[in-house]
Image (tube, rainbow, N blue to C red):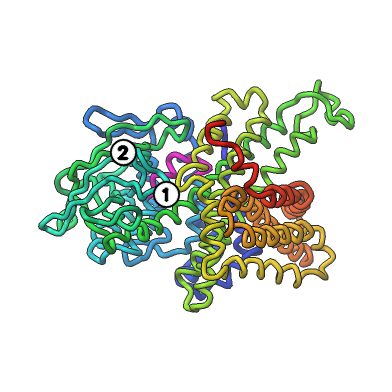
Amino acid sequence: MPSYKAPIADTLFLLSDVFDYARCDNLPGFSEAPLDVVEAVLGEGAKLAEEVLQPLNRIGDLEGCVRHDDGSVTTPKGFKEAYKAYAEGGWMGLSVDPAYGGQGLPYCLGVSLNEFAISANQSFAMYPGLTLGAIAALYTHASETQKQTYLPKMTSGQWTGTMNLTEPQCGTDLGLIKTRAVRQADGSYAITGQKIFISAGEHDLTENIVHLVLARIEGAPAGVKGISLFVVPKVLVGEDGSLGARNGVSCGSIEHKMGIHGNSTCVLNYDGAKGWLIGEENRGLNAMFVMMNEARLGVAVQGLAVSEVAYQNAAAYAKERVQGRALSGAKEAAKLADPIIVHPDVRRMLMEIRAFNEAARAAVIWVALSSDEARRSPDAAARQGADDRLGLLTPVLKGVLTDIGFANAVKAQQVFGGHGYIAEWGMEQFVRDARIAMIYEGANGIQALDLVGRKLPKDGGRAVTAFFGEISTFLKDNKEDAALAPYLAGLKAGSGQLQQATMWLMQNALGNPDNAGAGSNDYMHLFGLTLLGYMWARIAKAVLAKKAKGEANEALETKLILAKFFNERMMPEAGAHLARLSAGAGSVMAMPAAAF
């Protein structure tokens, strides 16, 4: 059976030593959460993940969710009790505004705890994860009456939330939405249509589910310009906050899926369900994007989280499983064979996974801190810079971390050999569960197109220019540091190649948009490698600073080894991405559609 240990020490190192968490003391919520409090909160969250959520992961996979004839859904054994513990522990409202019952603590702390929960049990973590996204959308765009109606009970975990976008005929192309909204005399709307792939769409964890639904008001313009967002509760809520009659929304079926069986992914049927407009008419995508961006960062964390738990189990197995002898001679002569950790290719796989995990965790925390700064900083310029960074890097993190996270789950499975293919070891579940993250909340190809087509040219390229400038300044400021030099070479090369790729797109994509489409995936991964390289450079600098103060231990030395490994063995992939991108769309688009 798989096991899991939350990476508390690594998370604290990143917050304190790499990103100087203390500098954020002037931001609301940070003064209430100094590092000693952060450490205590992470410890309690780790305990919940390790002792309550992780033991249910296999159960959730085997049992799945069950839909009954009346349309109700039962979650796997133990989920209801685990959710009660999660809600009563106050975890849902950790970073939510205290005005609606939250604790107002930093978002970066919530993101780190989310990693722990996902590693322990991805299916379970999706229930509160989607609720937090719905809370963010309501908080930003709903009326004060709507906020007072829904947010306190969602923040407490008494109610959960969902997002309803996809329909049978449309996923990415939301302009094709058919769900309609008809104005009612009382100011509400009657919502009719069908939504599919709705995670946590129906369950027995809470007494109410607050659905955020995209629909088209009668007479609205065609395409995305005519889409509005509605709040549609499963159970209607009275003016005094009490629950009333069941609304006209029901679970038609549960999707039969490759993985995440413990989460109820539903087909939801809306039959004149009563809903209320959120924000302005025909501006639904603008409102929903708040939730989608929150969800995209959450999905990026899924890629990291599954990679982390898969690594932990693969590393433990490699140190115990004996098979063959080391090429350089027996390492444990008293045994019939050596543990497979002695074999270079096993080490390669494990080090590739871990080098990714530690840099990806740093990138996630950096972006989460940017979100905190964008929302909480009193300085307008700081807010803008942080928001630019958040917008630029969100598609990179979603696409790259989930692509590599899935690949790493497969590598970890490979370490187990034949046992990795057997269900009882748990590795094949990690592979199946990880696969969805590359698809939902915008397939990764869409993330790449969003990066190239929208995020790069936005505001005249202000965000990407600032990103390049930050790396350039870091390299310049540290060019005389001989000890750091081995950990900067890869970043310097990768940053230069990323700038070349950016220039190539600027020169070749406007005249032929297919060049952007054909090169977008390589560009996204080249960007991701550069970002991870920058994270390793900052980690190495922090480690060397601690060593200069006389602090030395195995964990710090390991980080330097991993930083060097990343520079030597992983950053060179940047050149291949640049070469493919620069080849253009010629061969990609040459073959007639009929020839496929």
Residue 398 seen in this snapshot: yes
Viewer-proximal residue, 103 or 130? 130
Residue 121 part of the magenta segment: yes
Magenta-drawn stretch, dominant element (helix, strand or loop): helix
Q: Say whether residue 216 is left or right of residue 265.
A: left
Viewer-proximal residue, 320 or 263? 263
Q: Say whether residue 523 is left or right of residue 60.
A: right
Question: Badge 2 is on which residue?
Answer: 203
319 vs 192: above or below: above
121 vs 399: above or below: above
Question: Badge 1 is on which residue?
Answer: 129
Residue 59 part of the magenta segment: no
Q: Which residues are magenta?
A: 118-130
358 vs 351: above or below: below
Q: Quadrant of the N terminus?
A: top right
Q: Amino acid at mark 1?
A: Gly
Q: Amino acid at mark 2?
A: His
**Residue depicted at 25% across the width and 62% down the height:** 148
Viewer-proximal residue, 186 or 87? 186
Residue 125 location (% of width, % of height): 44, 44
Residue 308 lies in quadrant: top right
Residue 10 lies in quadrant: bottom right
Residue 231 location (% of width, % of height): 26, 54
Residue 63 location (% of width, % of height): 40, 27
